Image (cartoon, helix red, strand yellow):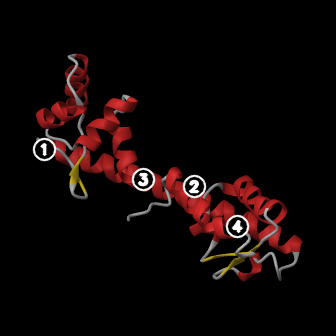
Amino acid sequence: MKLSAWDESTAAEVHRQALAPIEAGEADTLAIWSWDRFSREGIEGAFGLLRHLEEHLGAQLYSLQEPFLSTATADRQQRELMLSLAAWTARWESERKSQRLRAKVASKRIHAAALGQRARWGRGQLPSEADAAQVRALRSEGRTVREIAATVGLSRATIGRMVQGCVSPQAEGQATGS
């Protein structure tokens, strides 16, 4: 199974699985590798997660890479300051990565368009503006996602995302790359 820290539903499922033993009373400490691998929700989200863990579940946090965030041993004031910094850094590192990926997608589209091709991303292809127009036209004719994918030459998943959210090719590249 491939997991992505940039997928909110994946992150929520990982949190649920990580907290399940604590909620069941089978564990009293949540051990994480580092804060930026656990959450990218920023400072408010970090304090909300920590408050839920400590006050609601009665458990402790231990970060293997950041022992100064440990709720069991670190000074509370120091921990709050360091958690703020770690959470802020995680969120903005995530945002910078997203920006880099969007720029890479745009660059790939420009180079591919100059060659009269569709840009490739991983094993798939990125839809162009012409693809988006064709998808909209075929959908307005009542065609299914499967039929549209076969006609346009893109994956059913890509067409499904485009149809579901009326996604532009630029947003489709962000969904694919981030």
Q: Are marks 1 and 3 in contact (CB under 8 Å)?
A: no
Residue type at mark 4 is Ala
Lower sequence index among marks 2 and 4: 2
Q: How far is the residue under mark 2 from the one under mark 3?
A: 16 Å
Q: Earlier in the sequence, mark 2 or mark 3?
A: 2
Q: Secondary structure at mark 1?
A: loop
- What x and y, as percent, mark residue 143? 20, 23
| Numbered mark located on residue 117 in the image | 1
- Sequence-wise, the earlier of marks 2 and 1 is 2
Q: In percent of the image, x 78 and y 64: which residue is there?
A: 57
Alpha carbon distance from label 2 to label 1: 37 Å
Q: Is residue 35 above or below residue 170?
A: below
Give how far apart the Cα atoms at labels 1 and 3 are.
23 Å
Q: Are marks 1 and 4 in contact (CB under 8 Å)?
A: no
Frontmost residue, 148 versus 91: 148
Q: On the image, numbered disc 4 is attached to which residue?
A: 24
Residue under label 3: 178
Q: Earlier in the sequence, mark 3 or mark 4?
A: 4
Q: Earlier in the sequence, mark 1 or mark 3?
A: 1
> On screen, 19 above or below 64?
above
Give 23 or 130, whichever is nearer the viewer.
Answer: 23
- Count residues near mark 2 (Cα–Cα under 10 Å), then give few for <14, some for 14-19, many for 20+: few
Disc 2 vs disc 1: which is toward the camera? Answer: 2
Q: Quadrant of the N terminus?
A: bottom left
Q: Are marks 2 and 3 in contact (CB under 8 Å)?
A: no
177 displayed left or right of 9 = left
Amino acid type indicated by mark 2: Ala
Q: As shown in the figure, which amino acid type bears the numbered disc 3? A: Ser
- Mark 2 sits on what residue? 12
